[in-house]
Image (cartoon, helix red, strand yellow):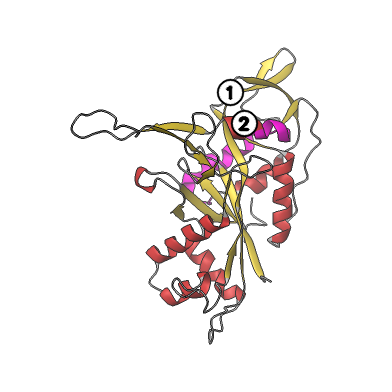
Amino acid sequence: MYTKSDIIFMYAETGVHVGGGDSVGAIDLAIAREKYTDFPFIPSSGVKGAIRSFFDNSTKDKENIEVIFGPEINGSEHAGAAIFTDARILLFPVRSLKGVFTWITCPLVIERFNRDLRIANYSGESIKLPELNTGKVLVSSNNKNTLKDGSDKKVVLEEYTFDTTESDLKGITDLFEKAFPDSEEYKYWRDKIETNLIIMSDDDFRDFAKSSTEVQARIKINSETKTVDTGALFYQENLPADTLMYTVAASHRSFKKGDTQTANDIFDILKTNLDTKSLQLGGNESIGKGIFNLNFLSGKETEK
């Protein structure tokens, strides 16, 4: 069993394509989705593979790479000391009539996150979710997506209008702000979490997560005729930029014979190399897809 663990927030700075989903309608290359929820996710093998590739390209300490991730050639020698879970959705960006866009989430997503906070041995408080009234969405009193409609406030997301209920979401937004580095260039996004967060029902969240992804036409041009090559037109689904996901990272002691590094030693290497860094995950690296910023939660329990 692992002895050291933490949440790693994964903030999509570009569109992301991690394939594996069933093709539906006009979409030829769909993103990976959970079978029973239809929520987008990234398989743990893809997360671990991308992080190993990052280590391969950023450090010359090949011996520690094998200790952390396992031998690349003879995997039977020993297991890797690091563990990564599937990356799960936490906040999904949706177009808003006011405020350009908002982040949405739902009780199912938040309660999963609470469960993963426990797995990650988070020392702070878990999220206490306010009661969600049927047919309404929860917003904070300073939400910048709301529109005045007489005495009521509404939000218009895509082409759908929702009645709102104001609630104190500060405990939630304070925790979600920790998904971003403390540097100045992320201040706008940390502040935006406070004013552009909406909590909706599980069913509504699922519908947006299915219908509000990006679908892009991809083609290959024949260099001689300057027309599309036969059969070279296809439609690809992407997670939109500004999606927030997370994975639980954990570590054992080293399994390599003769190596005495503890679980804390292994995790310190992970955090030192990955915290606040950006890496590429998924397909279409050559056209700038799949760039995530990684941010560890640990050490931020008492920060604003």
Q: List the residue tagged with mark 2.
A: 208
Q: Which residues are magenta?
A: 181-206
Q: Secondary structure at mark 1?
A: loop
Q: Residue at x 44, y 73 (%)?
A: 73
Compared with 63, 163 (above or below) is above
Residue 205: quadrant of the picture: top right
**Figure check: 26 above or below 175:** above
Q: Residues within 10 Å of mark 2 (few under 14, many from 20)?
A: some
Q: Is residue 166 left or right of residue 102?
A: right
- Classify 43 as above or below 22: below
Residue 216 on image: x %, y %: 43, 32
Residue at 56%, 26% in the rendered image: 99
The amino acid pointed to by label 1 is Glu
Magenta highlight: main SS: helix
Badge number at residue 285: none
> What residue type is disc 2 on?
Phe
Q: Position of residue 169 (x, y in %)?
A: 72, 38
- Closer to us: mark 1 or mark 2? 2
Measured Cα–Cα span from mark 1 to mark 2: 9 Å
**Rendered image quadrant of residue 219:** top left
Tell me, yes or no, if residue 198 can be seen here: no
Quadrant in which the N terminus appears: bottom right
Give the residue furthest to the front: 230
Q: Are marks 1 and 2 in contact (CB under 8 Å)?
A: yes
Q: Residue furthest bottom?
A: 258
Looking at the image, how many numbered discs can be counted on the residues? 2
* Residue nearest the observer in this picture, 223 or 254: 223
Q: Residue at x 54, y 78 (%)?
A: 78
Q: Which mark is residue 158?
A: 1
Where is residue 247 drawn, in percent x and y?
60, 55
